[in-house]
Amino acid sequence: MRLVAGMLVGVFATFGLGVVAVFLLLKLHAKGVRLPFVELVLVGPLTAIVVGSLIGLIAKERARAAAALGIAPWALLVLGAFWGQTTVSSWVITLAVASAYLVLGIAAASLVGGRMARSVTFNS
């Protein structure tokens, strides 16, 4: 049950944070502020880490699996955003970025889930 809950929270949280990030970036862009590579360098990794940590809090023992299942749709969306690319190098970069986001989220979930599983003592 925790696996399913963690996965669902991960899916909704990644897309929710993505919508908020795009909204804020578009507001900045409308004001004339240009921030190149902010989405790639700051927004994506922070989203993966925050959502992975949240999944780790919920799933505890099965945090890695829940994070992989919860963050994977968002990582696929990142791949889909660059669907029109035709060069091999752009596809390699896109795959590397999506994989890095997925690994960051799984690592954060594993660290937080491991901490939470060890900190819980039964029959105390």
Image: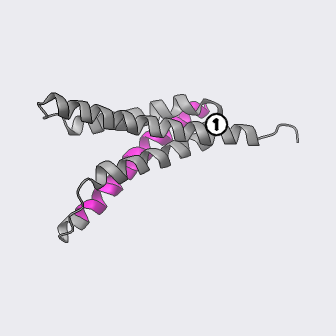
Determine whether, in the image, residue 32 is placed left or right of residue 110.
Answer: left
Determine the residue positioned at 29% across, 55% down.
Answer: 38
Mark 1 residue element: helix
Left or right, 24 with reference to 8: left
Q: Is residue 7 visible?
A: yes
Between 96 and 69, the residue placed more toward the observer is 96
- Where 64 falls versus 20 (above or below)? above
Residue 83 within the magenta-colored segment of the rendering: no
The range drawn in magenta is 1-27
Residue farthest along the front direction in this orientation: 89
Q: Residues within 10 Å of mark 1 (few under 14, many from 20)?
A: many
Image side of residue 83 versus residue 78, left or right: left
Say if the magenta span includes residue 16: yes
User: Which quarter shows the N terminus?
Assistant: top right
For the view shown, which residue lies furthest in the bottom direction? 31
Quarter placement of the C terminus: top right
**Amino acid marked by disc 1:** Lys
Closer-to-camera residue (120/91):
91
Percent coordinates x, y for residue 99 in the rendering: 37, 33
Horizontal and vertical percent for residue 30?
Answer: 18, 67
Q: In percent of the image, x 22 and y 39: which residue is there?
A: 81
Q: Residue at x 43, y 51 (%)?
A: 46
The residue that label 1 is drawn on is 60
- Percent x, y of residue 119: 75, 43
Provide residue 54's location: percent of width, then percent of height. 55, 46
Between 49 and 26, the one nearer to me in the picture:
49
